[in-house]
Image (spheres, helix red, strand yellow):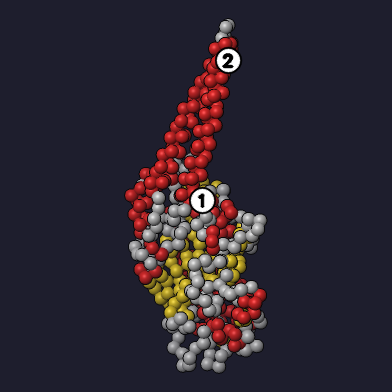
Amino acid sequence: MLDNRFIRDNLETVDAAMLSRAFAWDKDGFLGLDAARREAIGRLEAMQAERNANSKRIGQLMREPGGGAEGDKLKVLTQQLNVRIDHAEEQIRNSEADLNRLVLALPNLPDQSVPHGVSELDNVEVRRWGEPREFGFSPQAHWDLGVALGIIDFERAVRLAKSRFTLLSGLGSRLERALINFMLDLHTSHGYREWWPPVLVNTETLTGTGQLPKFADDQFKTEDGLYLIPTAEVVLTNIHSGEVLEAADLPRRYVAYTPCFRKEAGSAGRDTRGMIRVHQFDKVEMVKIVTPQSSFAELETMVADAENVLQLLGLPYRVIELCTGDLGFSAAKTYDLEVWLPSYNNYKEISSCSNCSDFQARRAGIKYRDPTGVVGEAFRGTRLVHTLNGSGLAVGRTMAAILENCQNADGTVNVPEVLRPYMGGLERITAE
């Protein structure tokens, strides 16, 4: 969420940022609502001052001989003033609610280092790791290979739920569990604290990280108003909502495995086969809560932590820096990791690591006590933290990449060496 005062004082900057994102924002609406709110606040303060003066004068009159009649008249005027004050307070609440709705719909401002561009075609490749394998046979796509091995069942998943769901069994289930445990062990060894959070959250929690109100159509909502989480970022970031942390306790580095749920609204016809774009999937998520001074350095180390997973698995990938027109709603800067998938003859996203600057922190009310005593925040000596999030990794897509990149001509799949201790020493997946 952007700061109202910042928007008002930096209209040209906000205009340019929204243009770079190809986002049309209602500047006139913002200015009108902001002006109405400030005008109402000015009237309210004047009336409150008048009421205070009246109260003081009434007290004086009531103590003076013969002052009762004038005091009674002033009481009537003050009662009428109270009605006007109530009306002004209601106007302010309405103006603030309208202004809040408008500002909540605005995306974050891209960092100055983000390359300008209109779409994913303008994203910048930063580096590659590993070389796509040259097969001496026709490799199978994971949606065929997994079925042939008896470890993935798409047909029964559709019967149990609907399309875009996956049913794993046997060694498929064990591989999924092995990947989750491997990723958690790796990230906790790098200093991340593991959490086991709820997967149902309230409206305030989703609003804090930016999923609501903009992406309401992509959320699964229960009858009692709770939502299934689309990513553990939502809960990990909001652990400290409404809190003031100590600077000495930052950075906070958190990690969690959760199932994730997305309606995939607007994705009809995209990646309809396999495990790439589904309604329910497993993910290990990293979140950092840091000081503004360290956030971009922390982003680079978060990307390195996600890369480390792919490197240890031996999966070729590339790192992409997203342009302004392809940034996610809450992000100020984002790197995507894309793993090589032979079935696409291309790279597909497997991790997205973002610095959200103070955008989520302002929405969720997460601050830290700055020992330098900065003035200008809600409380002297406190500042908004910066929040970061990144997939470490999307587990289903990682399984798909392993099946496709590690397959053999006979239809078996070699288990990456780092996963073998998690699979009882198994070196190769064969048909069940």
Percent from the top left, x then y, of residue 344? 46, 81
Q: Does 419 sit above or below residue 134?
A: above
- Type of amino acid at the residue the image marks with label 1: Arg
Q: Is residue 301 visible?
A: no
Secondary structure, mark 1, is helix
Under mark 2, the amino acid is: Asp
Residue 343 screen position, x and y as percent: 48, 83
Residue found 52% across the figure and 30% down from its top: 85
Q: In x, y percent, where is residue 82?
A: 55, 27
Real-space Cα separation, disc 2 to disc 1, in angstroms? 47 Å
Q: Which part of the image, by quadrant, shows the C terminus?
A: bottom right
Occupied quadrant, residue 162: bottom right
Q: Earlier in the sequence, mark 2 or mark 1?
A: 2
In the picture of the structure, the residue carrying the numbered disc 1 is 363
Residue annotated with mark 2: 72
* Callout 1 crowding tier (Cα within 10 Å): few <14, some 14–19, many ≥20: many
Badge 2 crowding class, 10 Å Cα cut-off, few under 14, some 14 to 19, many 20 or more, is some
Q: Identify whether 411 is placed above or below 260.
A: below
Q: Along the line of sight, which residue is nearer the eye, 176 or 109?
A: 109
Q: How many marks?
A: 2
- Determine whether, in the image, residue 411 is placed left or right of residue 106: right
Residue 147 in the image: x percent, y percent? 59, 85
Judged by depth in the image, the label closer to the viewer, 2 or 1, is 2
Image point 54% across, 79% down: which residue?
Answer: 274
Q: Is residue 392 left or right of residue 5?
A: right
